[in-house]
Image (cartoon, helix red, strand yellow):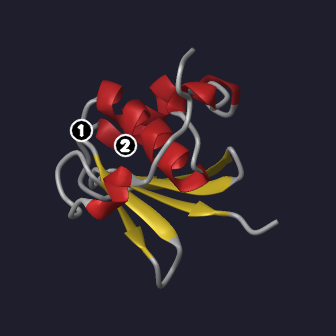
Amino acid sequence: MTDTTHSHTALSRPFGEDAIGHDPTTGTYHARFDVDSTTTVVTIVETVATATDQNPTSLSPLFETLDPEALASLVTSARSTSIDVSFTYEGCQVTVSSHGTVVVEPLKD
């Protein structure tokens, strides 16, 4: 039997490398990623899973919402101005920045 529960143990860690931080004032979850396509997608899925208290493997595939390769290309390409991309995924507003940040805000029912 596989344990599919997802705990908020990541929330107790300080915000920094490989951590998902929670801002109780705004109700948002924050994470950072290295500026490459692999970590961008993984960070999005892990942050949404934490925000929704789900196992990352139980979420719908990100490619059903948007093209993850196109998103990663947008936010990881070298440019003189920053770019933010926002979309809805698994009942959350997700904003990905070319500064290497992901902000997830669970939407109210």
Q: Is residue 65 left or right of residue 51?
A: right
Q: Which residue is mark 1?
A: 35
The amino acid pointed to by label 2 is: Val
Determine whether, in the image, residue 1 is placed left or right of residue 79: right
Residue 36: x and y, percent?
26, 31
Which residue occupies 54% across, 34% down? 55
Q: Residue at x 33, y 27 (%)?
A: 37
> Residue 73 or 52: which is nearer the viewer?
52
User: What amino acid does circle 1 point to?
Assistant: Val
Residue 51, position in %: x, y?
54, 55
Corner quadrant of residue 54: top right
Instruction: Classify 102 as above or below 63.
Output: below
Above/below status of 109 relative to 64: below
Marked residue nearer the N-terminal end (2 or 1)? 1
Q: Which residue is mark 2?
A: 75
Query: Which residue is situated farthest in the right direction here?
Result: 109
Q: Quadrant of the N terminus?
A: top right
**Residue at (40, 67) in percent of width and height:** 22
Question: Marks 2 and 1, Cα distance to the nearest angstrom?
Answer: 8 Å
Residue at 53 percent of width and 74 percent of height: 27
